[in-house]
Amino acid sequence: MNKSFIQIKKVSKIYKNKFAALKNIDLNIQEGEIFALLGPNGAGKSTLINVLCGITYHSKGTIFIDGVDLTKNRKKIKSLIGLVPQELHLEAFETVFDNVNYSRGLWGKKKDDNYILNLLKKLNLDDKKNNLLMQLSGGMKRRVLIAKALSHNPKILFLDEPSAGVDIELRKEMWDIIYTLKKEGVTIILTTHYIEEAEEIADRVAFINNGKIILVEDKNVLLNKLGNNKLVFTLDKNLKKVPAALNKYSYKVNKNKSYIEFFLSKEKNEVSDILLSVRKSKMDYLDFNIEKRSLESIFVDFIKKEKND
Amino acid sequence: MINLLAVKAIYFHEMNRTRRTILQSIISPILSTSLYFVIFGSAIGSRIKEIDGVTYGMFIVPGLLMLNLLTQSVSNGSFSTYFPKFNGTIFELQAAPISGVEMIIGFVGATSTKSIFLGLLIIATASFFIDLKILHPLLMVFFLLMTAVTFSLFGFVIGLWADNFEKLSLIPLIVITPLVFLGGSFYSINMLPEIWQKISLLNPVLYLVSGFKYSFYEISDVSIWTSIITILLILFILIVITLLIFKKGYNLRN
Ligand SMILES: Nc1ncnc2c1ncn2[C@@H]1O[C@H](COP(=O)(O)OP(=O)(O)OP(=O)(O)O)[C@@H](O)[C@H]1O
Ligand SMILES: [Mg+2]
């Protein structure tokens, strides 16, 4: 049987103050995939990452990474892992270059100045390499943390909100870096509050809330399965009454009746069918377009449902 | 297997930190040693008669050395492990594939290097004020080395244990300094009433100071072997405690 690269079985984490931050988590992550963890503040995303990186210990359950039991051989597993933490914790008085080099050393890798210089170049940090860390902006510090995590060629990369405080341009560059790493076979696990980010780069996503995984799904499947698209007509005049011929579709009219949206169910010819009916019913409209449902709205729905349950 | 590259990384990272504050690291011991010699060596010392056959200025060298070695090793050692917890960079040490032993060698190695350097600096400074002689240089180096390593390790443990700045300065202040002052650094215990001589023997630092004194002038409060065994014993106990702490992950992981 093809075993998962990272196997998390019934893992719970109870902090010293008795707070249960993870409750019975089951999760499998495949080698070489980009996996996004989504969830509101305090959901337990960082806790899960910290458990996997050995920064904190889990209280219950088992974790296997690359076939190795985490509690049995942490050192071996840690040597595979690079971590970009959520918080910008860095020394103040060390230079960028020295600090990135230090990380490489900590992971027991031979000094390789060229590799580090290249890395800094890729992350747009080469002109800052001799600056002290305290002289950097927040976004630059984030990039240094990324450089530190990549300095030792990890096989698994954890990115805890890598794009918090990073400008759009760099976010795109970071995505490029992530794609390149994926091509090299690196497994990437990231958390983000920018759902577009997960939508853009993740292969699979997990929703996590209150320390529980509420959904794990292939991103495209999820968008297809739950992402009912909508056909939205912007109306010319405010609509008095929806023509009876349209009643066979499921639709919604907004409050001041300036547009009408039809929910699509992915049946064949559905869109042209609706368009024909609209034309026949002589409903005037200015414009129409198809709205794809985003991960964000799916996510918000899920969280709402959880709250109501 | 020890991961030497990681040990090296930690060691040089720490040494670089020291280098950034090198002026402070050199000037303060030179200054304080000079003050001791001006006050106790010349001003007051000239009125004190020889102790065990050496002038008072000479007599205080081993004690002064011990005072600086102990306080600096403990405070630098504790700072080096407390600081990453304070500024959050501890996450990297936690996530890195390094064992407790590797961390100890890297950190304690760097702190002791600094202490040994400091000790040599104090000896050099002292030689400006007094006619310094070291009868057993190898033995002196042994005590210098062992004391530096042992108390750097002690500092390392305190840094792991402390969770605020108060605790960090507590032990050096209320334990180390009194023990050094009461350990015969600036007097010979046979100057004390008998009961206090007995109490003094409970002070482990006394054995270390005595060992140092012996290596310099062949004068001592206890036998040299007792001193050697004491320092080895303290080091051994500390190593055991530190390894236990690492095994439990105490204050390193929540
Ligand atoms: N050291 C700790 N001791 C006690 N509780 C903690 C500790 N660290 C985190 N928690 C709690 O665990 C829960 C999960 O925290 P975590 O940092 O994993 O959330 P998160 O999903 O990463 O949130 P965010 O999106 O804000 O980063 C929170 O309720 C938090 O208060
Ligand atoms: Mg978090």
Image: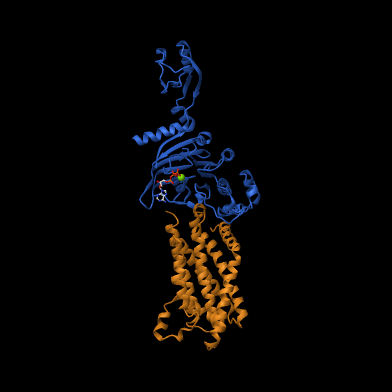
A302 to A42, vertically: above or below:
above
Q: How is the image coloured?
A: by chain
Q: Which chain is blue?
A: A
* Residue occupying the point 46% across, 30% down: A222
Looking at the picture, how far across and down is residue B96, in whole percent? Answer: 52, 53
* Residue occupying the point 52% across, 68% down: B73
How many marks can you see?
0
Q: Locate the C terminus of chain A by quadrant.
A: top left
B152 to A258, vertically: above or below:
below
- Asked if residue A256 lies left or right of residue A144, the reply is left
B168 to B197, vertically: above or below:
above
Question: Which of the 4 image quarters holds residue A169?
Answer: top right
Looking at the picture, how far across and down is residue A115, in whole percent? Answer: 64, 48
**Residue B127 appears in the rendering:** yes
* Residue occupying the point 49% across, 73% down: B231
Viewer-proximal residue among A97 and B204: A97
Q: Which chain is orange?
A: B
Viewer-proximal residue among A184 and B253: B253
Looking at the picture, how far across and down is residue A297, in whole percent? Answer: 44, 31
Looking at the picture, how far across and down is residue A267, in whole percent? Answer: 45, 19
Question: Which of the 4 image quarters holds residue B237?
Answer: bottom left
**Residue B215 appears in the rendering:** no
